[in-house]
């Protein structure tokens, strides 16, 4: 992040969180830069990362929405989506093949402890190992869900902070003094006002009533996280950016749902919060960001996420 140069924090966040999730899922990468993270990776493992970044860039194109709609009721990708996924699928299957040749599906996992190794050593209810396609589905879900939401939460946090100079100044002071409670409140307020996943869907497995409304089984119900987080009976002045509200209150899991709710709540929420605290704190400590009175960035939809339209554009005034 060079002084005086506008940068998109969504891009920086993506590089960091992709490094973390690639390390956890595939066991590759130990450096802080992309080049370091690829050190020791096989060509297939590097291809997974490159294909993943390419897929995310393509997913913001308007045609991507049409491709998703065309696949809405299809269990397997087809048409344009299938073509776009083909390079990523090929890379993932090659990584799986490499690990099988290493013996990573044995009892000791070939000496590895990453998630891919755990999946390859797992057995289904029938006692049989998971097939390559099942492993591929799990890996794709983990990698996409494990970094996309976190990287954009970083971008939204600083998009909000740079438009509120007093809050930003206090956040810098908190980061420098080790006040993790206030940094956590800033992150929570960012996720409240700009939840990266704005809604969740649940298919009714049995008839259900909600107040005066009756819902039959088989119906898909949508819950708006964005609207829930802006209810003024739960959050006074809901459109204001006020981290202090999270210092004086602890909302219930049904009032604050940045990671969804119920038994389908995101399993990676703990990792995501740990990542966010580290990344946000280090940015606050290492650079002075320019505050602005420009209007807030408009949300832009990518897949199921809500991202800043300009990628969380900020300008660093100086490095510390």
Image (tube, rainbow, N blue to C red):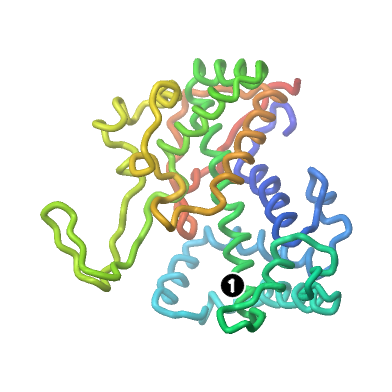
Front one among 200 and 109: 109
Give SS at disc 1.
helix
Relative to 285, 145 lies left or right = left
Relative to 214, 101 lies left or right = right
The relative height of residue 173 versus residue 31 in the rendered view (above or below) is: above
Residue 251 position within the rendered picture, expressed as x and y whole percent measured from the top left: 37, 34
At a point 50% along the width and 19% down the height, the residue shown is: 167
Front one among 58 and 30: 30
Which class describes the residues within 10 Å of circle 1: few (<14), some (14-19), or many (20+)? few
Residue 290 position within the rendered picture, expressed as x and y whole percent measured from the top left: 60, 23
Q: Which residue was labeled with disc 1?
A: 137
**Quarter of the N terminus within the rendering:** top right
**Quarter of the C terminus within the rendering:** top right
Quarter location, residue 101:
bottom right
At a point 80% along the width and 72% down the height, the residue shown is: 104
Numbered-mark total: 1
Residue 81 position within the rendered picture, expressed as x and y whole percent measured from the top left: 54, 75
* Furthest residue in direction right, as rendered: 40
Residue 170 position within the rendered picture, expressed as x and y whole percent measured from the top left: 55, 16
Quarter location, residue 6:
top right
At a point 69% along the width and 62% down the height, the residue shown is: 115
The relative height of residue 101 versus residue 283 in the rendered view (above or below) is: below
């Amino acid at each position: 992040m060079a002084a005086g140069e506008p940068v998109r924090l969504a891009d920086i966040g993506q590089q960091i969180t992709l490094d973390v999730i690639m390390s956890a899922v595939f066991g590759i990468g130990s450096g802080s830069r992309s080049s370091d993270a690829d050190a020791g990776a096989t060509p297939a493992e590097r291809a997974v990362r490159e294909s993943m970044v390419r897929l995310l860039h393509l997913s913001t194109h308007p045609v991507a929405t049409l491709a998703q709609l065309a696949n809405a009721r299809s269990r397997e990708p087809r048409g344009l989506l299938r073509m776009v996924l083909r390079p990523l699928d090929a890379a993932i299957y090659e990584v799986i093949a490499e690990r099988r040749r290493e013996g990573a599906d044995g009892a000791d996992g070939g000496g590895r402890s990453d998630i891919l190794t755990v999946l390859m050593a797992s057995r289904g209810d029938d006692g049989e190992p998971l097939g390559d396609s099942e492993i591929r589905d799990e890996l794709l879900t983990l990698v996409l869900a494990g970094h996309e939401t976190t990287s954009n939460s970083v971008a939204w946090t600083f998009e909000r902070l740079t438009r509120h100079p007093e809050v930003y100044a206090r956040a810098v002071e908190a980061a420098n003094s080790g006040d993790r409670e206030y940094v956590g409140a800033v992150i929570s307020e960012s996720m409240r006002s700009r939840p990266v996943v704005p809604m969740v869907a649940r298919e009714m497995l049995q008839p259900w009533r909600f107040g005066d409304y009756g819902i039959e089984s088989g119906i898909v119900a949508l819950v708006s996280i964005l609207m829930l987080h802006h209810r003024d009976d739960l959050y006074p002045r809901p459109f204001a950016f006020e981290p202090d509200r999270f210092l004086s209150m602890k909302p219930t899991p049904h009032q604050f749902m940045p990671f969804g709710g119920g038994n389908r709540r995101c399993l990676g929420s703990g990792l995501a919060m740990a990542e966010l605290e580290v990344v946000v704190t280090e940015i606050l400590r290492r650079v002075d960001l320019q505050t602005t009175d420009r209007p807030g960035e408009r949300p832009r939809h990518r897949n199921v996420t809500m991202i800043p339209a300009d990628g969380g554009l900020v300008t660093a005034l100086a490095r510390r």
